[in-house]
Image: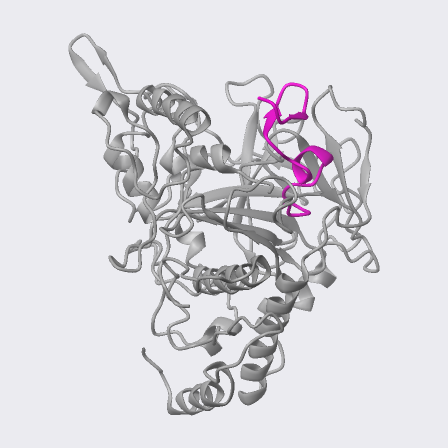
Amino acid sequence: MKTKISTTSSDSHQYYRRKSWYITGIFEFIVISLFLSLCACKPHKNSNDVPIPGFLSNDAYMVPHDLITPQGITPDQELGYLANFAWEEFIALNWPSTYKSKKPMRGRADTKKTALDFTQYKGAPLVWQTYKHRVEIYPQGLVSFQQKGASYSYPNYQTKFDSLPYYRYRKGVNSSPKIPQCGVYDPVSMAWETIPNTDLTKIHLLNNLDETSEINLATMFVDGNPNAPGMAPPMGTPIWMNLPTQPRRFIYQAKANRSMFDYVQKNSYYDKGIRLPAQKRTYKAVRNNGAGGNHQCPVTSANQSQVCFPHGNNNTEEEGAILIKATWRELTLKVYNSGRYVTAEIIRYRNAKPNSGIPIGGSVPFCYEIVAATPTASTLPYGLTGLHIIHKTVNYPTFVFATFEQVDNLDQSKPNNQLFYYNRNSGLINPDKQVITKRAHPISSQVNQVNQEVHQQIRQLLQSSGLSDSVWLYYKLVGVQGHAVDAGVDENYFLANIVTETNEVLRSFSGTLDADAGTINPTQ
């Protein structure tokens, strides 16, 4: 099963979206060798006669490049193979990375770490977290131009994958306004104090949660947090602050790997003057000429290019393009202490409000905050609740879409864990608060079986090592697709993540979206 990967672009994602070693100690070496000999490498099959791989093998840090399935298998069996493949991706992409700020090599797994190290998450940047953020690949307003005989380009745009994160959103060149850091409340002086010389371009954190809605169709929340640390601000302070009774909003980020970034660089698609015409040509080629199902990119002239991201290939050992979408939410103190969530230091954003330390009516009407990965006197950490992995390969050229969730997302028995959303588009019938009580589309039995197999292998490794728990026991595969199919063909046709594609439009998406009305239009 262990092979290597390729993906597509966020643009191609719109076209193809379907509904459809080193051991560091003798003890660790003995433990893992014993585990592999007794469990992971022992050949056996699941109830659909699909081989069960050793998910925690010595090369589990390697992202699979492609999936090769036997001829003549049934759709249920293929789904089992795809679920295995999705979990192999998930483990490899959540492996500890080698990233260091002084030597920012990005997207590299730490091959000195073992499968046991993987089970014991310690907060180090994971491989996917070191990928390039979407705004690093496509900075807002980036267009090269000529003026008075001189060429201009976006200032400080990173042209190399291995560089510190750099986030700049505003349009223009050197005169662009910069995003400031939010003010800090001083409980001694009982006043808000500004933080000078801290614009966003000076911040190099890896997890930049800059999307606050589900592609502008819905905003997702979970009930309030009575365990918020710190003290409430004084009377008159606006409710936008992190008060204990405030619902916690789900926020998102998108990232892509080296293969995708290099392709964008090579084709100058960071320049929207080049990218947008190519997107239009690609859309027409896919819709009118059926050009979306081949892994090989079309040969075109420079001015007739189409967006066609590289594919994973076992023969050439190319990983191919991988796109990640991550969903996060603020945790309660009790939930954080449970150890059931991956947490990380993150950047989040707020609108400028009275007493926030940010001038109202200024050139930038919002500010950023840094939230630590552990509780502080004023903030609670954010936990990972959902993860998309989107991946183009030779054998699956319309991309393998896999989506994972934290297992407690829909557990209503837990206090302050009720999910709800608001539709953002006026054309929708239900603009009021919508409470989520069940999953619209159930997880398939094949996917559930693979989840159980992976969790069992983790438990066996933990038991053989004298350990009892791992954060990865609390994440599960929700669904996976390998083909763009017509309705009803695939059990995972409606591939919706409950915290990432929540409202009725996104969870039952088919065809294309009418973004203005917020409705489905499968005829467009």
Residue 362 vertical placement versus 149 (above, below):
below
Q: Position of residue 299 (x, y in %)?
A: 24, 32
Residue 357 vertical placement versus 384 (above, below):
above
Residue 121 falls inside the magenta stretch:
no
**Quarter the N terminus occupies:** bottom left
In the image, taking residue 61 as reference, residue 402 lies left or right, namely: right
Q: Name the chief secondary structure element in magenta.
A: loop
**Quarter the C terminus occupies:** top right
Q: Is residue 393 visible?
A: yes
Q: Quadrant of residue 154?
A: top left
Residue 52 vertical placement versus 77 (above, below):
below
Q: Residue at the spot x=67%, y=58% of the render? A: 444
In the image, taking residue 388 as reference, residue 110 lies left or right, namely: left
In the image, taking residue 176 as reference, residue 514 lies left or right, namely: right
Q: Quadrant of residue 137?
A: top left
Q: Residue at the spot x=70%, y=26% of the render? A: 424
Q: Which residues are magenta?
A: 495-524
Q: Nearer the viewer, residue 380 or 168?
A: 168
Q: Position of residue 191 (x, y in %)?
A: 66, 36
Q: Nearer the viewer, residue 174 or 317?
A: 317
Residue 515 falls inside the magenta stretch:
yes
Q: Is residue 197 visible?
A: no
Q: Position of residue 49 (x, y in %)?
A: 56, 72
Residue 235 vertical placement versus 319 (above, below):
above
In the image, taking residue 477 as reference, residue 165 lies left or right, namely: left
Q: Nearer the viewer, residue 184 or 491?
A: 491
Q: Position of residue 80 (x, y in %)?
A: 56, 63
Q: Nearer the viewer, residue 204 or 524?
A: 524
